[in-house]
Every structure is written in C-alpha cells, then in structure tokens.
C-alpha cells in the first residue's frame, strides 16, 4: 500500500472553513450523541458490541472498531444507528393483542417498540397476536410446511451470519425444495451472473487496500459516502497517496464531491475533495457510456493487446460489435458526449492501475447483467485484474449479503455458488443424507407472484420486509394476505407482520449476531470471513438463533435431517461443503479471520473459468426510448440503512423524503422552483413529490426508496438474475 510523504495536503482540502461550518453535510458528532442517548441503561453492553463485535451494517468488515485496511478507528453513523436494535429491551407482548392501531405506524415506530421476546400467534380473523411456547409454535409451523411445491423461504441480509444462512438453506432443502432466496437477489444478483460468466468468480477480485495508491478508482452507479461511510476514510488515504477518483453516475452526489471524515483530524477540520472527474449519464445509460469508452480505447491503441491475447477470449467479437455502434447511438443512450467518453478512455488507457467499483445503480435494471459485463470488458481491456491496485469490486451494502449466496441460500445455487444440477444435487444428497431437489426454486419475486396467484401456501421470512423492498407494495400486500401460513423470524416488528392472512401468522423471536453462543461469522466485500464472538449482556425474552429455528423445523418435517448442535459444528460443515471457505472451521475468537483467495483473485491473469481465460462480452445497447414528455426516474437512498429510514432529511443534499431530484434545465423548462408540489405518474401508480433542483442528468429524476416503489412495474426484471427494475418512465405534472 502506497503511503503519502506529506503529513497534510492542502490540495485535497474541501474548505478553509474549520469543520465545514456553514456547509451542508451530515453531523457525525451528533450521531455519536444520539447513539449515547438511545443506549441509555445499556451503554456498557453497547460499548462491548462496538469494541468486540463485527459490524452488522455494511460489508466493509471490522474487528471491533478496527479493520484490515488502515490502522485507524473504524466507526460510522450507520453502525451507531444500528446499536439501538442490538441493545433495546423487549416490547410488551400485550401491545400485539390488537394490532389495528399499530397498522398506522411507520416502520421506524414499530422497530422502536422493542425486541420480539416470545413466539406469538395470530389466527385468521383475530385482531392480534397471542403468546405461545416454542414447541407449540414449531409444531404448528412444521405441520404446514410439508408440501415443498407450495413453500417459499426468504432471508434478509441485515446482520445475518454465514451460520444462519447455511443452516437455513440446508433445512429448506431437507424439506424438499430449493425455494430459498435472500436479499442478494435484489441487489447484486446481476453481478453474480455476469462475473461467473466472465471471470469465473462471483466476488470482488481485489481488496480495499488496492484503492490506496491505485492510479484511479472509478465508481459507477455507486455512492459509498451514503452506503459505506467508512470507505470515505479509505478514499481520503487514497487521495493522499495520489489516487484519482472518477464517478460515473446520473447524479453528482454531494457526499462524493466533498466529505469530512470525522475521525481524521485533517479531514474533520478541512474536509476532503473526493471526486476528481465526474461523468454524468442517463439513468440506465451506463452501457452507452462504457461501450463508448472502450470504443475510444480500441481506436486509440490504448488496449493492452498482450494481456488480451494471453489471458482473454472474445475480444474480436467485442471489437466488431463496437465498430457497428455509431457515436450518435452511444451518445443518445449514454446521455453524454463522445468527448466525455474520450476523457475517461484516455485516463484509463494510460493508467498503470485502476479499481472499478459499482453498486445498485448498475445492477437494478432489466439490463443489469449487461451493465456488469460492460464494466468487466473495460477491466479486461487494460488488464486491471489480479494485481496490486487493480480489480473489479461489486461493493456490498449488507454485512451478510456476500455470504448468503455462497452458503447456498439461493434459489438458483447450492453452497459454494454451484449451479443446481443433478450432479451437484447428488453430491450434497450424499453429504447430507437426504435427497436434494434437482431443479431451481422460486426467487424472492417469484414467491410473491406465486402467493398472489394462489400457488404458494406458506412463506417463511427471516427478517426483511417485502412491503418496503419490492416494486408495487399493494401487490405485495395482497400476496401476503393470501397465504395460509406466514412465519416471520425477526428481532423486532415490521409492517409486513401486521398484514392479515388467509390463515395463521406466526412471529418467532430471533437473536442478534452478538447474542449467539459460540460466535458467528460474516463475509465482507473483500471476501474476508470474520469471526464475531458472543457478547455477554442482557437477553430479551426467549429469542432463539435462526440456525436453531430452521434446524428444529426441518427435523420435524424430515426425520433424516440431523439438527445442528451449535455454530462451531456449522462452520466445520461449511468448510467441507464449500472448499474455498476452508479455514472458517478454525475461527474461534475475536479478530480471527480468513480471506478466501487471498488479496487478489485471478492473480497474473489466471481466471477461474474452465479454460482459465477472462471472457469479453459483446454488449448491445439497451432500448431507453420513452414516450415524449416523460422522464426516467430511479430510486435512491437518503438518510437510511437500506430500507430502514433514519431521518426525514438527507444531510448531504437537504432532500426530504418526498423530494424529487430534478435537473435545473428540466425544472426551468417546466417553470418549477424548489419546493413546488408535483405528481409523478407511471403506468403503475402515482407519487406526490416536491421539486429539489440538483445536478441530475437532464431527462432523469431521482426519488427516495422505498417511497418510489409505487411507480415501479413489478413485471420488469432482468432476464437471468431476475432482479426487479427499480426505474420507471413517468410524467410530471403540477399538484
């Protein structure tokens, strides 16, 4: 890792005003005070979690308040906000006797009621829930989970450790179905598809340390300032080491322009200029821009021909395809000029190293897989894989999401990410002692479709909230109401639990990762499997770890299933089932970790495909045509952690939840000023908003998620990963 020579570097300062006084930015010190107040009565326990636990926020990965990228404090406002969930006392079960009043509360208000302490049951037609025992709850659920063709299981990724994922997917398959899915389906599933095709591995190829000292770090459809805040400290160090930061996005994110790192003296006082080069594109126009960049590289001789010839295949097909794509078509799709494409092409084409980073702005499209393929093409063309300060990084926003699919909690994959085939199913059947289904299961969105159509009787949802993560919330509500049994496993209340069903609704209280005996592990974005020990402290009611709940259910349904006895036993089995996770069985204490594959995957251009070659993909331009007078709106996050909204106002841009971000060009054309009420209308629904002029590409709009889900077409999904399209064509009218 390259280190700067100067102690301070005024060239990178964002402002001469101490601590950014008068600047619009989040107040990270206020977040510390809020966390202190919210943990009243349990501050000792909260402090232990911060110092001894592995963060359950984003997927950067920690050992207490340290990490493996820098020798500095690792702490952010997301983690501080999550402390309350991990330390708050139990709710009063009497509150659930009649849920009519609770149905009108916001999700944040439901969470604030406290932890779920005991199993609770609501029969069809009843006003609320009644407390029952664990044995009664498990017997009731298992009795309704015996038809594998009419069962679906979904697991969220917020704080979910590898042990829970592995035990759950094994249990579901023991019950006779592959219909088990997790939150990776609606975030990076297109990355999984495209990376497996092109480089043979569905994970980042590099480490965070590779950012520091790279010639360029390019963020494409990604906003780590909001979603992975501590990564901004990595970028501070990268900037001081001479790294240049580029951003390809439909919105010039304020937090990516200037950022005040609160735990670093220089940055806390003067701030840090982050983005050096911004490239504005249309919503959904990334392929047009990236293809244009590669076309320039080819035409100007900036392709690493030696690397391409020795380590890749398919380049000539890409050369031919790009030659047939006119500059006019590329510009139209991209919403950017060929001169802007040339600028990035020249920078990457003459760079010795670069890391390409992307997130939901790339994946959550009907052409999400092709978006990722276009990014991979750029990396292969310059040999930016498998060496220091280079790599492909699908950065993760959930602490548990990388491990979810790798543990096999995936409707289209078995442990280790193996495809569901007769041969692979036979292998796990022999290992586990029961027959594993040979066909793919229902994905998360397909489960909701099946429930709505009456083809699904039972749904087990471990965490998550379909009403807040999928398009068309009313459709999801109707689907949930038609089920004969819903089992919600969680640490606190959510709005989907309160939807009446055409049968029973069962609430099962879960433990947090910090409460599980034997400790647990998570897998970070950089493929680091990290041990998080049990943290001694208060325990609410009679909550169980999810691995134990799923084991108990499966053993009741299938006598051939042997329940696990603890997390250490699960890790032993993971090491056998997923060979590249070897070493997880030896993780036992605070700080223990293993980075599978080492610092770099595909070292020296040796890819993990069958022939060892990286594969170029000829990527067609998407059809972004829309009716005259319409805009393309996309969804974004404000002051929130995934769907969990923390504040009404975003500290970076001042946007309230009902804001629609609009280009000043478009606002001027429509005669709209900041604060003007408007209505966005799509074929799927309407959303009342207030205009906020912002540096958004003309023709594009941004609204907050999950509020904007009412505008989305639930039928629009990508062809392979089946991720929903979180974008829509809308009209804008005055309210």
Image: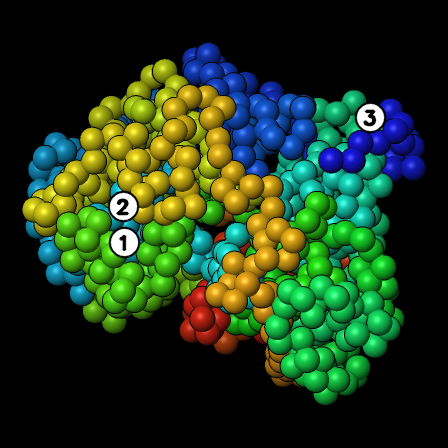
Mark 3: give few (<14), some (14-19) or many (20+) Cα within 10 Å.
many
**Residue 687, x across and y down, in percent:** 54, 63
Tally the marks.
3
Q: Nearer the viewer, residue 568 or 405?
A: 568
Report whether residue 711 is seen. Answer: no
Q: Is residue 131 above or below residue 471?
A: above
- In the image, what residue occupies the spot 67% across and 23% down? 72
Q: Is residue 322 left or right of residue 228?
A: right
Picture quadrant of residue 531: top left
Q: Is residue 154 above or below residue 596?
A: below
Residues at marks 2 and 1 touching, judged by CB atoms closer than 8 Å: yes
* Mark before the other along the chain sequence, 2 or 3: 2
Q: Which residue is mark 2?
A: 168
Picture quadrant of residue 439: bottom left
Residues at marks 2 and 3 touching, judged by CB atoms closer than 8 Å: no
**Residue 3, x across and y down, in percent:** 80, 31
Mark number displayed over residue 153: 1
Q: Label 2 vs label 3: CA separation?
A: 46 Å
**Residue 557, x across and y down, in percent:** 10, 49
Q: Given this view, does label 2 or label 3 mark the residue nearer the observer? A: 2
Split into 4 quadrants, where in the image is the C terminus?
A: bottom right
Q: Secondary structure at mark 1?
A: strand
Q: Nearer the viewer, residue 265 or 323?
A: 323
Q: Nearer the viewer, residue 378 or 653?
A: 378
Q: Which residue is mark 3?
A: 266
Q: Is residue 314 left or right of residue 388?
A: left
Q: Is residue 233 above or below residue 143?
A: above
């Amino acid at each position: 890792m390259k280190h700067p020579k100067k102690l301070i570097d005024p060239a990178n300062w964002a402002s001469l005003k101490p601590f950014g006084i008068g600047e619009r930015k989040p107040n990270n010190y206020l977040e510390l005070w809020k966390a202190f107040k919210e943990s009243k009565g349990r501050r000792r326990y909260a402090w232990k979690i911060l110092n001894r636990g592995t963060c359950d926020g984003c997927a950067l990965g920690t050992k207490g308040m340290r990490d493996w990228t820098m020798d500095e404090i690792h702490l952010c406002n997301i983690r501080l906000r999550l402390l309350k969930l991990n330390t708050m006392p139990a709710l009063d079960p009497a509150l659930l006797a009649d849920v009519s009043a609770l149905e009108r509360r916001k999700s944040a208000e439901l969470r604030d009621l406290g932890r779920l302490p005991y199993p609770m049951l609501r029969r069809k037609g009843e006003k609320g829930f009644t407390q029952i025992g664990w044995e009664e709850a498990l017997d009731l659920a298992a009795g309704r989970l015996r038809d594998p063709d009419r069962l679906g299981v979904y697991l969220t990724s917020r704080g979910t450790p590898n042990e829970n994922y592995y035990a759950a997917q094994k249990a579901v398959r023991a019950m006779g179905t592959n219909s088990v899915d997790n939150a990776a389906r609606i975030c990076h599933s297109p990355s999984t598809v495209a990376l497996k095709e092109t480089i043979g591995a569905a994970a980042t190829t590099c480490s965070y340390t590779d950012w520091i000292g790279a010639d360029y770090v390019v963020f494409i459809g990604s906003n780590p300032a909001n979603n992975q805040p501590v990564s901004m400290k990595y970028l501070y160090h990268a900037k001081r080491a001479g790294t240049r930061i580029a951003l390809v996005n439909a919105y010039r994110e304020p937090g990516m322009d200037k950022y005040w790192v609160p735990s670093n003296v220089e940055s806390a006082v003067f701030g840090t200029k982050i983005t050096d080069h911004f490239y504005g594109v249309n919503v959904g126009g990334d392929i047009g821009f990236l293809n244009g960049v590669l076309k320039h590289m080819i035409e100007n001789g900036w392709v690493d021909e030696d690397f391409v010839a020795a380590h890749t295949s398919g380049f000539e097909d890409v050369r031919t395809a790009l030659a047939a794509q006119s500059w006019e078509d590329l510009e139209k799709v991209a919403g950017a000029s060929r001169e802007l494409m040339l600028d990035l092409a020249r920078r990457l084409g003459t760079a010795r190293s670069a890391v390409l980073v992307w997130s939901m702005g790339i994946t959550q499209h009907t052409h999400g897989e092709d978006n990722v393929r276009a990014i991979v093409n750029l990396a292969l063309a310059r040999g930016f894989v498998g060496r220091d300060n280079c790599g492909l990084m699908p950065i993760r926003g959930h602490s548990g999401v990388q491990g979810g699919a790798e543990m096999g909690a995936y409707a289209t994959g078995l442990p280790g990410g193996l495809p569901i085939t007769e041969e692979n199913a036979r292998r796990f059947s022999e290992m586990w002692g029961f027959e594993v289904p040979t066909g793919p299961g229902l994905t998360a969105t397909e489960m909701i479709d099946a429930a709505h159509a009456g083809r699904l009787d039972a749904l087990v949802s471990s965490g998550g909230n379909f009403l807040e993560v999928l398009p068309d919330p009313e459709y999801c509500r109707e689907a949930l109401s038609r089920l004969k049994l819903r089992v919600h496993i969680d640490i606190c209340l959510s709005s989907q639990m309160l939807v009446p069903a055409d049968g029973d609704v069962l609430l099962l209280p879960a433990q947090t990762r910090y409460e599980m005996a034997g400790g647990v592990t998570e897998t970070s974005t950089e493929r680091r499997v990290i041990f998080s020990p049990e943290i001694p402290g208060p325990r609410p009611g009679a909550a169980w770890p999810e691995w134990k709940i799923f084991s108990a259910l499966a053993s009741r349904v299938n006598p051939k299933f042997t329940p696990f006895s603890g997390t250490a036993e699960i890790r032993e089995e993971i090491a056998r089932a997923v060979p590249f996770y070897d070493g997880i069985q030896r993780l036992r204490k605070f700080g223990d970790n293993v980075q599978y594959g080492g610092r770099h995957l595909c070292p020296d251009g040796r890819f993990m495909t069958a022939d060892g070659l990286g594969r170029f993909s000829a990527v067609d331009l998407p059809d972004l045509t829309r009716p005259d007078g319409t805009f393309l709106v996309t969804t974004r996050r404000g002051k929130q952690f995934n769907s969990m909204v923390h504040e009404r106002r975003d500290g970076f841009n001042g946007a309230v939840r009902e804001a629609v971000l609009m280009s000043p060009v478009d606002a001027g054309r429509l005669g709209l000023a900041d604060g003007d009420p408007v209505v966005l209308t799509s074929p799927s629904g309407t959303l009342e908003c207030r205009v906020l002029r912002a540096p958004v590409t003309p023709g594009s709009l941004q609204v907050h998620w999950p509020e904007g889900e009412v505008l989305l077409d639930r039928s629009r999904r990508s062809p392979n990963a089946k991720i929903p399209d979180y974008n829509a064509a809308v009209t804008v009218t005055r309210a």
